[in-house]
Image: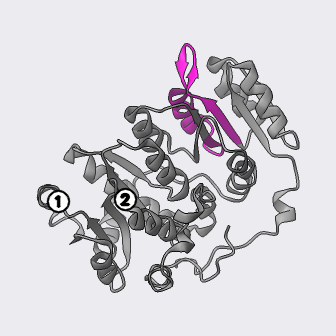
Amino acid sequence: MFADEIQHVPQAAVDASAFRILTVVTDARVQRALQVLWRQHEVIACTDPAGAIELARGRDVDAVLCDQRVPPQLGVDVLRDLRRAHPRALRILLVERPEPRLLLEAVNDVEVFRLVDQPWRIAAMREIPAAALRAARLAPPLGADPLSDEEAERVRRQLAVVVIDNDAVTQQRLRDLMHGTYKLHFAPALDRALQFMEQHETGVLICSTGTGRDELASALKALKHAHPHMSTIAIDPISDYDRVIELINEAQIFRLLRRPFNPALCRPYVDAALARYWYIKSQPQTAWRVATAEPAAPERAPDRLPPALLNRIRGLPGRLHESEARH
């Protein structure tokens, strides 16, 4: 039996002990800035990436912030290892002008909780401890194991996979790859997709998020806020890294594909996304693990969508809860 709503825990219970965050940074100036910024929390400074994982496990930290440049390693590699060794800790990557490959790895391999671009915004950095503390203390790690064959078949029959893309070639490639295995629906734009989603419980949304699709980006944020168990696979040229970081933090995209993409990746990504949907819906408290960040640009906040569109998104089938109090 699926839970109908997320159990809300009083804030006092969350704040019972100090937030413990490990910062893996070799730049002394950045370390000092983080110590000052998060002085009310327990900040454990580390300059040795080789020892960071054992330190994180030994101190049972709630989150690890790692700079992308921690010679001789890369931050994504440190956080990738942390995901396996200490999954309770939230993963935060500090970057400067990230390359497309880094963004792909941060989403697909590391599943970062936040990706912080330098120079960081003070307001965004102050939001991280509270959000990460709730996620680390109130929610168990999200399951990484695949569904059994029987469960996977049941999920594929019950949940739809919706593709929003007006490119005929992309649609045909995905149709050839996934037709007959998934409950697929193709739509050229958001409105057509929502018409289908209003009638069918949807587990995965695959969509093109390229330049000029601001309303879609805002809709993805609103969708994740209202339906945290639904997963988005974004297809993006990754030519505007600010937009991609916004989607990572504020829409919690599950996987990222760079256009032109390798179709062979789609099926394992969709299967993992459906499993994630099933896991969160069966254990609603884990939705804290995909809590969205506050909007960096207020004009692109999800609540700035037309009220009628926002209500349609909130009213889609399969919602975990009716309250907006999760954040």
Camera-nearest residue between 193 and 145: 193
Q: Which residue is mark 2?
A: 148
Q: Which amino acid does the dot numbered 2 rest on?
A: Ser
Q: Is residue 323 magenta?
A: no
Q: Is residue 70 magenta?
A: yes
Left or right, 47 with respect to 242, comes to right
| Vertical side of 37 occupied by 132: above or below | below
Mark positioned earlier in the residue sequence (1 or 2): 2
Camera-nearest residue between 145 and 294: 294
The boundaries of the magenta stretch are 63-91
Query: Residue 6: x percent and y percent?
Result: 64, 73
Q: Which amino acid does the dot numbered 1 rest on?
A: Asp
User: Which marked residue is nearer to the observer: mark 1 or mark 2?
Assistant: 1
* Number of the label disc, if any, that sits on residue 167: 1
For the point 48% across and 45% down, the residue is: 242
| Vertical side of 96 occupied by 206: above or below | below
Assess whether mark 2 and mark 1 are in contact (beta carbons under 8 angstroms). Answer: no
